[in-house]
């Protein structure tokens, strides 16, 4: 815990809040994955983790290590960028697969009033 | 074919390489090589050049998306906790006909839509450029087709024109 001793309290609080918000959002996303009723709804839950879930934790990390001045903060930005760029790929594959299955089975969800659940 | 068909792509990849490996003279040579090869490979995949016309607008777009993502994170998290079974909300599909045709701009829009909780990009119909979205909460949420049409699409068209 050598890092924490060097960290000014004000910065420590900001970092703690960001990391807490990030992990809580990720947890809620995971919870949603269990609780939500249908496949398309469940597609939305993990995006909590990939947007501000990851964002909060990474931002906390950026602030902490740039305050400590121990290293460059760029790897976090790179991580965030990669998460942003790669999540749509899997999400689209999953969404399209579900849509393809629904269409093949005659449940075409084009109507905006859509499947109730 | 020039030596560097995609300068922007090559440059970004070279910078990422240096970030991952650390900046030493040897790695700098490698980074340039990797950037050139990756740029050439990307050129084989697509003929369309990545050209950002208005970098300033890009910042505006990033700022906008940043705020929207915060708001929708909050909304979706709340809904998952209070109304997971969907008694008071209704999810469903929305279809929007896009005017955007540039593939890089569409990729950007896909990133924006998927990273915003509450909306999922499902399919883009190549026949009429119709985008099928799934929206988590149709009842309380903002009108997503209007948001995309007015907030994102004009900016993206301007940036990647």
Image: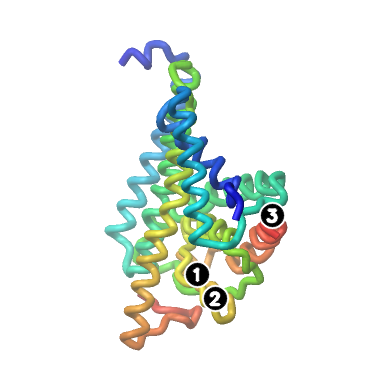
Q: Circle 2 sits on which residue?
A: B95
| Mark 1 neighbour class, 10 Å CA radius: few under 14, some 14 to 19, many 20 or more | many
Q: Circle 1 sits on which residue?
A: B133
Instruction: Locate residue B32, reporting x and y percent.
Output: 51, 36
Residue displayed at 45% across by 27% down: A15
Q: Circle 3 sits on which residue?
A: B159
From the viewer's side, name the closer residue of B109 and B25: B25
Question: Pointers 2 and 1 in contact (CB under 8 A)?
Answer: yes
| Mark 3 neighbour class, 10 Å CA radius: few under 14, some 14 to 19, many 20 or more | some
| Residue B28 visible from this viewpoint | yes
Mark positioned earlier in the residue sequence (3 or 2) = 2
From the viewer's side, name the closer residue of B120 and B88: B120
Furthest-left residue in view? A34
Q: Nearer the viewer, mark 3 or mark 1?
A: 3
Q: Whole-Å distance between the Cαs marked 2 and 1?
A: 6 Å
Rendered view: A54 above or below B140: above
Number of marks drawn: 3
Rendered view: B105 above or below A1: below
Instruction: Locate residue A51, reporting x and y percent.
Output: 45, 47
Same chain for the residues under marks 2 and 1 in the image: yes
Residue displayed at 66% across by 48% down: B58
Indicate left or right for B143 with A51 as reference. Answer: right
Mark positioned earlier in the residue sequence (3 or 1) = 1
Residue displayed at 34% across by 72% down: A97
Mark 3 residue element: helix
Mark positioned earlier in the residue sequence (2 or 1) = 2
| Residue B75 visible from this viewpoint | no
């Amino acid at each position: 815990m050598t890092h924490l001793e060097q960290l000014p309290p004000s910065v420590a609080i900001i970092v703690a809040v960001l990391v807490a918000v990030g992990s809580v959002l990720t947890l809620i996303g995971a919870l949603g994955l269990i609780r939500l009723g249908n496949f398309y709804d469940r597609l939305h839950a993990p995006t909590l983790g990939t947007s501000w879930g990851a964002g909060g934790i990474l931002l906390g990390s950026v602030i902490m290590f740039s305050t400590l001045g121990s290293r460059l903060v760029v790897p976090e930005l790179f991580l965030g960028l990669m998460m942003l760029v790669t999540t749509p790929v899997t999400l689209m594959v999953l969404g399209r697969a579900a849509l393809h299955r629904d269409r093949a089975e005659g449940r075409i969800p084009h109507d905006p009033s859509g499947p109730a659940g | 074919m020039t030596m560097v068909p995609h300068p922007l792509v090559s440059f970004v990849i070279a910078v990422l390489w240096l970030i991952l490996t650390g900046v030493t003279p040897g790695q700098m040579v490698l980074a340039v090589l990797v950037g050139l090869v990756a740029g050439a490979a990307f050129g084989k995949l697509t003929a369309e050049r990545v050209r950002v016309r208005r970098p300033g607008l890009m910042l505006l777009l990033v700022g906008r998306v940043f705020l929207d993502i915060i708001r929708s994170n909050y909304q979706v998290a709340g809904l998952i906790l209070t109304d997971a079974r969907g008694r008071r909300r209704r999810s469903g599909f929305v279809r929007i006909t896009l005017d955007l045709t540039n593939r890089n701009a569409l990729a950007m829009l896909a990133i924006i839509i998927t990273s915003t909780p509450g909306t999922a990009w499902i399919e883009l119909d190549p026949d009429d450029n119709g985008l099928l979205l799934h929206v988590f909460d149709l009842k309380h949420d903002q009108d997503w087709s209007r948001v995309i049409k007015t907030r994102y699409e004009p900016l993206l068209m301007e940036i990647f024109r």
